[in-house]
Image (cartoon, rainbow, N blue to C red):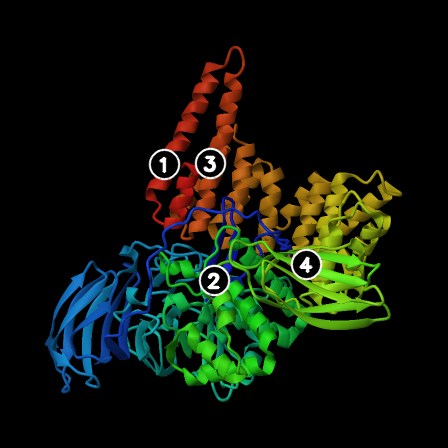
């Protein structure tokens, strides 16, 4: 599953999906920027009690085959189902069977005899969660029996919860079921991970269960269907409905079962080894489907060859759905994506989300073929899928792009680690959803990269192939991966797995360089500052001498303090620690600034140059450092160019640097760089141009550039151009902004939202009202935040406030996405705070206007009552916790 990340107003909250915790990464903050996370101050906390042990599910009965016959009640948002389930005892004799079945109406439970007749069975439906069934006799190992369940699944009656990765766990979702939202299609889709498949069919809902399947879906003729495996039959019923039968003969775990129903375009790519490759998109995006997903056949080739294990499943389809509860989900042969993947050709210039496509595809090996046996071992799914993104990018776009992606992953983990440090493989957790975090995804991906570097490519990929083949269609734990690696390498890797997979935290290392020029001796002192015991850190150290001479040394830092020493005849220009840039650590390295200039010029990797630019940017007051920093504006790699532009101190730049930024803003091939340059020029312009040569002429040039940028093909650049125009000339900028109000691009909507929130007049209220009715999750999140600013600025206008409060209340109470509801509440809280401030100011004068104070008290009280209603209705545990923390 792929997660998507959002930095929320009150907390940094990770949203994810399957497969996907980047990994969705939606660019809500328009200028994502690489930053080095500084080592936090170490705080020793009191020991807390461990959460309960969470092992794998005990295997009593083995589910062999699942047959489902379903149809849908759109009005009630229910599924009418008949399940026929084949079982055998796993090992011990048993006369009992327990099925997971959440929130059902159970109509019948029976044993199906060999002649097809049914015998009713005694059962108890426990807490609307489990069906405990008394079998007709004791069955022994190898003896098969068949159970029939007639039921109605009622997902809307379930109390939905969720996690950072998967925001709801109802399992079955009816989208726009009554057709009341004119710009949203009617759809049905499912989301099984972690254990929500049992919200729509009875099963053994555990990751260590595997079953083949057949699903018969009866739907209205106008809809297409999608499920796992191949469609083996599609038959019109003569009454406006059709029954499609999907069948998969290779076993997989129940959380990977999926269904989709909706009116979609189905775009078929070239087949892969005779297997269908297809993309289900809304019809408005049919012409862009090949641009969005078109690298899929090449990905199938790449992963099949890299792992020496050809893709084994019947087909590979991908479908984009509305209001998905995660970023994406690797349902076997039928991946679901959130609707941010649907993009026009212009939107694809800014973001393709190809990493998500890669993430979900490689899950078909790591997660679908071989599945973690318990949620404690989730990194065996998610770490590999996250690293699979890196592998694809490295193959397709080169090492620099891949290393940039890997660096982003490391920063996401380090950010989470400032407040959460847990083992990667952890059997003690309060809730299985807690496993879906930046540890399981991003840290795990970086650890696999470090492991690959340590043992070498050949050994790494040979071991992965052995691991997959030996355990295909089975559930596994982390030791089975280690044993495959040890078999290939001949190494004992317990130390590596113990410190990286079974130990919380990461190294926090201070590195001091000491040069004794008199005795020609160089010492590098490593001090591990983390609370945890010292790590064993095998390091590659490259020593750079004049005349392009480079010498590599190997050193292991394995104590609280370790010193690497060498003698020299010629003083090194710099010494590059962790020369391959693979360590999962926080480092505080003390070096002279001139060594970073040499590192930028001579070291080979993107991360070498990024590190140099990052350090030079912190000392721009020294002219030589600023001059060296400016080199990055013309770097061969776009991320360095964007990083340099965004890092420049606007008060230190001159006409030359401004000229370089203007060229970048207009001509750079990457929209990210053009946007970064525009944003920096906006900042420079806001600070004033009086210190520059010919400031009036420069101002005119900038304004022409800003206006031209609004016509950029990339929406993110056009959005930055709009913001720049408003910053430079509010009246002209607002007039230009109005011409963009019909654009559907999220980048543009969010830019207009920001502009109107800060500067819009009362006539712009209609923009917020209109867009909130139809915008996607990410845009609604931003719109509510900025609508809050708008209404707070206009708090004394009762007509504006009354209308806004009604909309904000509706979104805070009824929006289907919890973090969007949160921003509706935050907007109301901001307005309440402004009214309280106005009341305080009125009361502070010698003779307060009693009528005005009374009116404000009434409005404040009304808002307080509305906010209490919202908190009283909220059921999402994470959001309820946030409200409690905020004192709502």
Is the residue marked by circle 1 packed among few (<14), some (14-19), or many (20+) residues within 10 Å? few
Of callouts 4 and 1, which one flags the residue occurring earlier in the amino acid sequence?
4
Which quadrant of the figure contains the C terminus? top left
- Of the two numbered discs 1 and 2 in the rendering, the one whose residue sits closer to the viewer: 2
Is the residue marked by circle 4 packed among few (<14), some (14-19), or many (20+) residues within 10 Å? some
Q: Residue 450: where, in percent of width, then height?
A: 58, 70
Give me the C-alpha separation between circle 2 and circle 3. Answer: 41 Å
Q: Are marks 3 and 4 in contact (CB under 8 Å)?
A: no
Q: Residue 462: where, in percent of width, then height?
A: 53, 84
* Corner quadrant of residue 556: bottom right
Q: Are marks 2 and 3 in contact (CB under 8 Å)?
A: no
Residue occupied by mark 3: 829
Of callouts 2 and 3, which one flags the residue occurring earlier in the amino acid sequence?
2
Residue occupied by mark 1: 868
Residue at the extreme front of the image, as rendered: 519
Question: In the rendered image of this protein, does residue 230 appear above or below residue 835?
Answer: below
Give me the C-alpha separation between circle 4 and circle 1. Answer: 57 Å
Residue occupied by mark 2: 503
Relative to 249, is 502 on the left or the right? right
Give me the C-alpha separation between circle 2 and circle 4. Answer: 24 Å
User: Which mark, by number, is residue 525?
Assistant: 4
Of callouts 2 and 4, which one flags the residue occurring earlier in the amino acid sequence?
2
* Corner quadrant of residue 33: bottom right
Q: Residue 672: where, in percent of width, then height?
A: 68, 59
Relative to 665, is 405 on the left or the right? left
Relative to 284, is 189 on the left or the right? left
Of callouts 3 and 4, which one flags the residue occurring earlier in the amino acid sequence?
4
């Amino acid at each position: 599953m792929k997660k998507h990340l959002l930095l929320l107003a009150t907390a940094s909250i990770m949203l994810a999906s399957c497969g996907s915790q980047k990994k969705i990464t939606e660019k809500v903050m328009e200028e994502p920027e690489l930053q080095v996370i500084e080592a936090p101050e170490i705080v020793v906390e009191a020991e807390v009690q461990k959460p309960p042990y969470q092992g794998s599910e005990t295997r009593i009965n083995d589910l062999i085959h699942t047959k489902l016959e379903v149809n849908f009640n759109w009005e009630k948002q229910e599924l009418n189902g008949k399940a026929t389930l084949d079982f055998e005892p796993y090992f011990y004799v048993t006369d009992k069977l327990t099925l997971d079945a959440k929130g059902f109406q159970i109509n019948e439970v029976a044993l199906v005899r060999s002649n097809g007749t049914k015998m009713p069975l005694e059962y108890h439906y426990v807490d609307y969660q489990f069906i405990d069934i008394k079998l007709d006799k004791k069955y022994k190992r190898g003896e098969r029996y068949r159970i029939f369940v007639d039921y109605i699944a009622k997902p809307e009656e379930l109390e939905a919860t969720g996690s950072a990765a998967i925001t709801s766990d109802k399992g079955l979702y009816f989208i726009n079921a009554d057709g009341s939202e004119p710009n949203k299609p009617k759809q049905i889709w499912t989301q099984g991970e972690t254990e929500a498949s049992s919200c729509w069919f009875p099963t053994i809902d555990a990751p260590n269960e595997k079953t083949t399947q057949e699903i018969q879906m009866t739907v209205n003729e106008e809809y297409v269907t999608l499920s796992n495996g191949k469609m083996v039959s599609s038959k019109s019923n003569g009454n406006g409905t059709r029954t499609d039968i999907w069948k998969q003969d290779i076993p997989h775990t129940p959380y990977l079962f999926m269904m989709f129903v909706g009116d979609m375009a189905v775009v078929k790519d070239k087949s892969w080894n005779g297997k269908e490759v297809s993309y289900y998109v809304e019809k408005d995006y049919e012409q862009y489907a090949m641009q969005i997903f078109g690298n899929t056949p090449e990905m199938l080739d790449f992963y099949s060859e890299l792992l020496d294990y050809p893709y084994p499943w019947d087909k590979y389809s991908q479908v984009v759905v509305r209001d998905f509860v995660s970023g994406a989900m690797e349902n076997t042969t039928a991946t679901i994506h959130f609707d941010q993947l649907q993009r026009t050709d212009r939107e694809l210039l800014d973001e393709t989300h190809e990493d998500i496509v890669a993430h979900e595809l490689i899950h078909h090996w790591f997660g679908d073929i071989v599945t973690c046996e318990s949620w404690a071992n989730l990194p065996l799914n998610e770490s590999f899928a996250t690293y699979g993104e890196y592998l694809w990018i490295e193959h397709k776009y080169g090492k620099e792009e891949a290393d940039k992606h890997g660096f982003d992953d490391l920063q996401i983990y380090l950010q989470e680690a400032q407040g959460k440090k847990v083992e990667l493989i952890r059997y003690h957790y309060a809730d299985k959803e807690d496993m879906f975090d930046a540890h399981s995804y991003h840290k795990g991906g970086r650890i696999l990269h470090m492991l690959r570097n340590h043992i070498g490519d050949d050994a790494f990929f040979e071991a992965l192939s052995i691991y997959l083949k030996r355990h295909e269609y089975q559930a596994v734990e982390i030791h089975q991966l280690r044993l495959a690696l040890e078999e290939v390498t001949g190494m004992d890797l317990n130390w590596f797995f113990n410190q990286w997979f079974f130990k919380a935290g990461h190294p926090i290392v201070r590195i001091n360089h000491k040069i004794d020029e008199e005795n020609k001796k160089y010492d590098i002192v490593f001090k591990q500052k983390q609370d945890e015991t010292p790590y064993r850190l095998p390091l590659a150290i490259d020593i750079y001498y004049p005349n392009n001479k480079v010498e590599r040394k190997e050193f292991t830092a394995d104590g609280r303090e370790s010193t690497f020493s060498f003698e020299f005849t010629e003083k090194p220009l710099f010494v590059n620690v962790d020369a391959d840039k693979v360590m999962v650590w926080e480092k505080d390295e003390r070096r002279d600034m001139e060594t970073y200039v040499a590192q930028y010029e001579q070291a080979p990797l993107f991360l070498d140059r990024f590190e140099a630019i990052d350090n030079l940017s912190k000392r721009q007051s020294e002219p030589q450092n600023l001059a060296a920093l400016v080199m990055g504006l013309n770097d061969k790699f776009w991320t360095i160019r964007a990083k340099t532009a965004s890092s420049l101190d606007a008060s230190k730049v001159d006409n030359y640097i401004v000229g370089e930024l203007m060229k970048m803003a207009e001509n750079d091939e990457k929209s990210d760089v053009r946007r970064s340059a525009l944003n920096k020029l906006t900042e420079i312009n806001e600070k004033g141009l009086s210190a520059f040569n010919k400031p009036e002429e420069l101002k005119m040039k900038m304004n022409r550039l800003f206006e031209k940028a609004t016509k950029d093909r990339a929406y993110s650049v056009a959005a930055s151009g709009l913001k720049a125009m408003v910053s430079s000339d509010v009246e002209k900028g607002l007039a230009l902004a109005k011409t963009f109000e019909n654009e559907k691009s999220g980048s543009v909507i969010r830019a207009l939202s920001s502009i109107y929130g800060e500067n819009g007049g009362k006539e712009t209220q209609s923009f917020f009202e209109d867009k909130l009715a139809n915008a996607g999750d990410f845009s609604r999140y931003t719109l509510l935040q900025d609508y809050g600013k708008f209404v707070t600025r206009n708090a004394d206008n009762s007509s504006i406030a009354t209308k806004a409060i009604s909309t904000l209340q509706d979104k805070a109470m009824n929006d289907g996405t919890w973090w969007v509801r949160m921003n509706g509440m935050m907007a109301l809280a901001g307005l309440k705070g402004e009214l309280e401030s106005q009341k305080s100011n009125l009361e502070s004068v010698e003779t307060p206007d009693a009528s005005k104070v009374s009116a404000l008290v009434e409005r404040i009280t009304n808002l307080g009552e509305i906010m209490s209603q919202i908190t009283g209705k909220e059921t999402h545990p994470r959001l309820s916790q946030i409200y409690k923390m905020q004192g709502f």
